[in-house]
Amino acid sequence: MVGLGDWQVNTTRFPNGLGSLAEKVLQLDVAATGKDATNPPKKLQFGLWVEPEMVNPKSVLYTEHPDWVLHAGDYPRTECRQQLILNLALPEVQDFIIDSLTKILTEIPATYIKWDHNRGTHESPSPSNHHAYSIGIYRVFKELTTRFPDVLWNGCASGGGRFDPAMLQYFPQVWTSDNTDALDRIHIQFGTSLVYPASTMGAHVSKVPNEINKRTTPLRFRAHVAMMAGAFGFELNPPVIPADEKSQIPELVTLAEKVNPIVIRGDMWRLNLPSESNYPAVMYISQDGSQAVLFAFQIRATSVHNYPYLRLQGLSPSATYMIDGRGAYTGATLMNGGIQHRFDGGDYDSKVIFLERVFLDGIGNGNGGNRNGISNGI
């Protein structure tokens, strides 16, 4: 009888241990790397998804320590997802989780841990226990992240339920929401960014129709939305990805790698809010101001193509910028006149545009003095 809470390797599924599997993964080359002698192949890394605060009633741990779970006296213990919650207010429970994860991370070369918490708290021995639980979990996180500083710890709780400043002391990234629909995610990520930097947000490209709202959106749109966050990835089943989408993935990965450093370390400027415009837009500017990336979206295609001019922000008015490697425009032109992108892809269309500062004093060729905006098919 082994269940959630019994942190030991299932030898039926992993007869050679989990460490053996991890070592095999670490030997796999990352695709599209190692193309020449100066660019050696990168290796895959190994991570684990865990729920250490949970326990199944049918487990060794619960059989031996039924008093370790949250409960209210003799009242029935509410199960959810066949789980009960360990009472992190108890020092012995804290020690058990610390020791269990320490053993795993000492024996297995994992460099990523996703720490999940997927059920609500329904019972507690006292109101004060909620506070003691929080203090207890902070002790657990502090101890583990101190012991394993090279592990990337990713927080999660029913999606973004634990996206708060206290958790960010220990987890540099949090899964933003279990709702991965691209249209909803534009709203979610814009809202989350009011409090938290983009670098802390996890976002993925998931399958369509979306599991939550059944909406279908283009792969490029889904990818561009996910690139607005600090942690970009794919949740797709390779054998069933349509051929036309599969062919786009290498290019999208390359784009994400180019975008990511600017998104993670740059300043974010909201140009059009999704709650107010059919054309949401946001831009990120690198720390030194030399680069910027603009995300422009069209939610619904309309018969009246009155595309808005996006007046950029955060640029140096007297500096000169190139747009996707073309032209030369002053920051004043881009911020006062703006740029216009003409969408032609129908509903859920998107465009990622790069800006590069080429002159600091505004001296250059092109439309440096034009304050009427730029509309040239960008």
Image (spheres, rainbow, N blue to C red):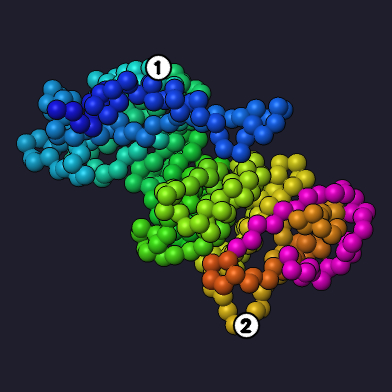
Q: Position of residue 198 (x, y in %)?
A: 56, 46
Q: Quadrant of residue 110?
A: top left
Q: Please tell me which residue is depicted at 44% across the width and 22% down the height of the picture.
A: 23
Residue at 83 percent across and 68 percent down: it is 371
Q: Is residue 288 above or below residue 26?
A: below
Query: Quadrant location of residue 104?
Result: top left
Identify which residue is drawn at 32% across, 21% down: 17
Tell me whether the residue at label 2 lies in contact with that at label 1, contact meaning CB atoms closer than 8 angstroms: no
Question: Which residue matches tag 1?
Answer: 106
Q: Taking 258 as reference, is 199 left or right? A: left
Q: Is residue 371 magenta?
A: yes
- 2 or 1: tag closer to the N-terminus: 1
Is residue 143 toward the left or the right of residue 94 in the image?
Answer: right
Q: In this orientation, which residue lies closer to the viewer: 158 or 141?
A: 158
Marks 2 and 1 sit apart, C-alpha to C-alpha, by 61 Å
- Relative to 170, is 18 on the left or the right? left
Characterize the magenta stretch by its predominant secondary structure.
loop
Q: Secondary structure at mark 1?
A: helix
Span of residues in magenta: 350-378
Q: Is residue 353 visible?
A: yes
The dot on residue 304 is: 2
